[in-house]
Amino acid sequence: MKTALTIAGSDCSGGAGVQADLKTMSALGVFGMSVIVSVVAENTARVLSIEDISPKVIADQIDAVFEDIPPDAVKVGMLSTPACMEAVAAGLKKYRPRHVVIDPVMYAKNGSPLMQESAISALRSTVLPLATLLTPNIPEAEKLAGMEISSEADMREAARRIQALGPQNVLVKGGHAQGEARDVLLCGEDFHVFASRRIPTKNTHGTGCTLSSAIAAYLARGEVLPEAVRKAKEYVTGAIEHALPLGHGCGPTHHFFAFYEADCD
C-alpha cells in the first residue's frame, strides 16, 4: 500500500489541517501518517488559540515516521513560526522524500491569521526551496510574489516569481477569484490550467488542505504532477459539491462523498 505523510496543524473541529489530510488520504486509498506541528483550537467560525509543538517533538515525530514507514509523498501545511519551519526543513533535508507538496497556510477560511507576519520571510528562505510543488491561493501568492493578482495572466506571472524563490513547481489556486474556478500550474517551464465550475456554497472549510493532500496522495500512487493535480481538483470539487452544512461558519467538505451520502438531519 502506498503511504503519505502530512506535516501540519491539528484542527479540533475536523474539517481542515491534519484531520482533513488523513481523511483525504484514506478516501484516495493511501495510508496516511501525521506529524503535528501546532494544535489549533478552532471551529468553522473562528480560531480561539494556537499552541505550537516544540521543535524537538516535531523532529522526533519525523524520525519516528521515516525510520519505520518511509512515506511515498509528503504534504506540508501550517507552519506558524520560524522554529517550526526550521525543524520541518531539517527533517526534509535529512530524509529527502521524493515528493513534497507544500501548502503555505497563512490564514484560516474565516480570515484568522495562522502564521505570524514575521514568519513569512523565514517561509521563503527555509521551506519554499524544499517544495516539489507549492500550492498558494491568491492571497498567499500575492504575499509571496509581491504583486496583486486580478487575472489569469497575473496568476502566471506570480507563479514565475514564486518559482524563482526555489519551489520546483507552483500551483496558484483560483478559488478566491470570481467566475469559473481556474487553477494555474507552472510545471517546470510549462503552464497547465485546470478549470471547474464554481459551486455556490459557503461550506469550504479545509479545501486548501484537502487539495494539497489529495495531490500528495496521487503522487504517492505514481501519477505525474499535472495528472495528480487534475485528479486532486476533481476530487475536491466533488467534496465541495457534497459539503456538509455543519457548524455556524464555513462548514467542512465531505471527504468520503464517493462512499456514502451524508445525512445531516
Image: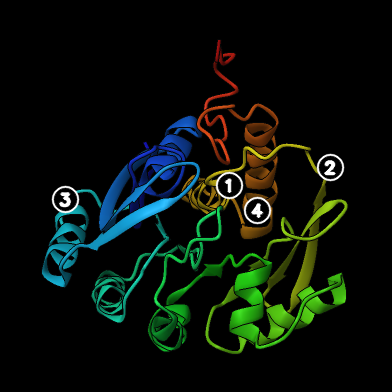
Which mark's residue is nearer the viewer, 3 or 4?
A: 4
Q: Nearer the viewer, residue 28 or 260?
A: 260
Per the image, label 1 sits on a secondary structure element best described as helix
**Residue type marked 1:** Thr
- The Cα atoms of the two marked residues, 1 and 3, are separated by 30 Å
Q: What is the crowding at mark 2: few (fewer than 14 residues within 10 Å), some, or many (at least 20)?
A: few
Q: In this view, does 3 lie to the left or right of 54?
A: right
Q: Residue at 72%, 55% (x, y): give it.
A: 175
Residue 29 locus on image (x, y percent): 46, 32
- The Cα atoms of the two marked residues, 2 and 1, are separated by 15 Å
Q: Residue at 39%, 38% (x, y): give it.
A: 13
Whether the residues at callouts 4 and 2 have beta carbons within 8 Å, the answer is no
Choose the circle earlier in sequence order: 2 or 3: 3
Looking at the picture, does residue 131 appear above or below residue 58?
Answer: below
- Quadrant where the image shows the C terminus: top right
Residue 158 locus on image (x, y percent): 71, 81
Choose the circle earlier in sequence order: 2 or 1: 2
Colouring used for the render? rainbow
Looking at the picture, does residue 18 appear above or below residue 164?
Answer: above
Can you identify the residue that label 3 sits on?
68
Can you identify the residue that label 4 sits on?
229
